[in-house]
């Protein structure tokens, strides 16, 4: 054994599709105005930070976390006004829930279907779990191509469909009627991923009782808790009971549980920040629209997608000037020359606009 190199062992033993993957790239953002990852740019008010510090100081971190934190789940149910019979399952971010769903539904030959361009993790997790993946292109305006979706569903019979509502990285909210037709036509489970719910005008939570094959997934990441890693699935207990079997018992740590509870008790602070982000988003939209050579797309999320010529050069120019956004050029043919900016503080946004204009030249 000792004569064999680690790299030849890796090549022999690691699954071929994993060898072929490149890891999800998170760039080093230190020193930049960071507008690349859909984070809430605002800190919490000082008194609340101090209350959190006291909670953390008293936390029993020598103990495993509560595997079924009823108080936290209760607060989520209350805030979302979940109808009776609708339960929640907590995840270490919603990324973990996507993985859990893929593991649960991946019978031999089962298919995970989504739209493209959309959140890249759907496809990546299909690969991680060796699940068959089908991506259906969106229409040119990034709306759902309903006819293409319905025929793909008929043809592929997907066990699992993910629809991000609003969609990432395009930012738009799909037609609710089209999503309903997709749910009704799907033989498998449809997960409506509402990661950006706080910035959008619609939700499928009220539809949960209507469709036996619907789950709604949400995350608190975009609402100001990205660092806590907390997401959840809402849906019928019949589904969640099965998924619970796959959830690692201690997937949400002691500190995230306690801090999230505190933040949910102060939900209005987060909602105010979300409202501020939405009003800043409207300002940014108009400013981007006014720049010659920029095509900006409608958004109901906390970010904006826009197209420029020479996007990679513009992205690099902005980075050199200290502003980090997301370069989507090269990721998907429909995203050629597209960039994505997260709404920041008013100061960050103004700096972004100045630096964008300088980088366009
Ligand atoms: N769904 C969508 C559509 C997203 O854009 C993201 C984050 N970029 C996630 C899920 C994952 O969020 P988290 O794991 O932070 O909960």
Image (spheres, grey):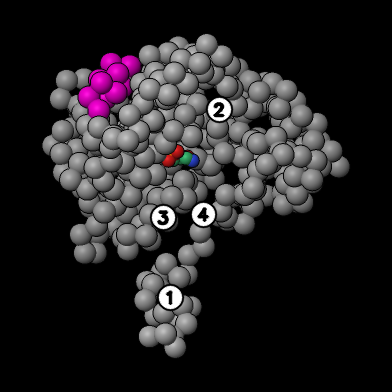
Nearest-to-viewer mark from 2 and 1: 1
Residue beneath label 3, please? 123
Q: Position of residue 327 (x, y in %)?
A: 65, 48
Assess whether residue 78 is covered by the magenta stretch. yes
- In three-dimensional space, the C-alpha distance between marks 1 and 4, rounded to whole angstroms, equals 19 Å
Image point 28% across, 16% down: which residue?
78
Nearest-to-viewer mark from 1 and 4: 1
Image point 80% across, 31% down: which residue?
354
- In three-dimensional space, the C-alpha distance between marks 4 and 3, rounded to whole angstroms, equals 12 Å
Neighbor class of circle 2 (other Cα within 10 Å; few <14, some 14-19, many 20+) is: many
Picture disc at residue 10: 1
- In three-dimensional space, the C-alpha distance between marks 1 and 3, rounded to whole angstroms, equals 23 Å
Quadrant of the image occupied by residue 125 = bottom left
Going from N to C along the chain, the mark reached first, 1 or 3, is 1
Helix, strand, or loop for circle 4?
A: loop
Helix, strand, or loop for circle 2?
A: loop
- The image shows residue 266, relative to residue 116, as above or below, that is above
Q: Nearer the viewer, residue 260 or 237?
A: 260
- In three-dimensional space, the C-alpha distance between marks 2 and 1, rounded to whole angstroms, equals 39 Å
Q: Position of residue 360 (x, y in %)?
A: 81, 42
Q: Position of residue 217 (x, y in %)?
A: 33, 35
Q: Is residue 287 left or right of residue 277?
A: right
Helix, strand, or loop for circle 3?
A: helix
Residue beneath label 4, please? 24
Image: magenta residue range = 69-79
Picture disc at residue 40: 2
Image point 55% across, 34% down: which residue?
38
Mark 1 touches mark 3? (CB < 8 Å): no
């Amino acid at each position: 054994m000792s004569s064999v190199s680690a790299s030849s062992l890796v090549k022999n033993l690691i699954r071929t599709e994993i060898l072929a993957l490149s890891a999800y790239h998170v760039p080093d953002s230190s020193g930049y105005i960071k507008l690349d990852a859909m984070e809430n740019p605002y800190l919490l008010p000082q008194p609340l930070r101090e209350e959190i510090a006291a909670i953390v100081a008293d936390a029993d971190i020598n103990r495993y976390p509560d595997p079924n934190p009823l108080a936290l789940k209760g607060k989520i149910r209350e805030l979302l006004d979940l109808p009776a019979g609708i339960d929640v399952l907590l995840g270490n971010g919603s990324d973990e829930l996507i993985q859990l769903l893929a593991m649960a539904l991946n019978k031999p030959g089962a298919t995970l279907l989504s739209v493209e361009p959309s959140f890249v993790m759907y496809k990546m997790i299909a690969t991680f779990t060796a699940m068959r993946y089908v991506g259906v292109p969106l229409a040119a305006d990034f709306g759902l191509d309903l006819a293409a979706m319905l025929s793909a569903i008929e043809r592929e019979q997907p066990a699992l469909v993910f629809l991000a509502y609003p969609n990432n990285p395009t930012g738009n909210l799909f037609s609710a009627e089209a999503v309903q037709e997709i749910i009704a036509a799907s033989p498998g489970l449809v997960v409506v991923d509402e990661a950006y719910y706080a910035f959008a005008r619609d939700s499928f939570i009220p539809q949960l009782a209507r469709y036996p094959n619907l789950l709604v997934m949400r995350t608190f990441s975009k609402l100001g808790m990205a660092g806590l890693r907390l997401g959840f699935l809402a849906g019928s207990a019949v589904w969640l009971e099965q998924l619970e079997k796959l959830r690692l018992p201690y997937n949400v740590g002691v500190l995230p549980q306690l801090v999230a509870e505190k933040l949910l008790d102060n939900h209005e602070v987060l909602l105010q920040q979300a409202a501020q982000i939405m009003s800043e988003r409207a300002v940014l939209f108009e400013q981007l629209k006014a720049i010659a050579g920029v095509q900006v797309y409608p958004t109901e999320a906390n970010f904006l997608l826009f197209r420029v010529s020479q996007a990679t050069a513009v992205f690099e120019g902005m980075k050199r000037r200290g502003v980090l956004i997301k370069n989507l050029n090269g990721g998907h043919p429909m995203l050629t020359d597209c960039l994505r900016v997260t709404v920041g503080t008013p100061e960050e946004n103004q700096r972004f606009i100045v630096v964008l204009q300088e980088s366009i030249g």
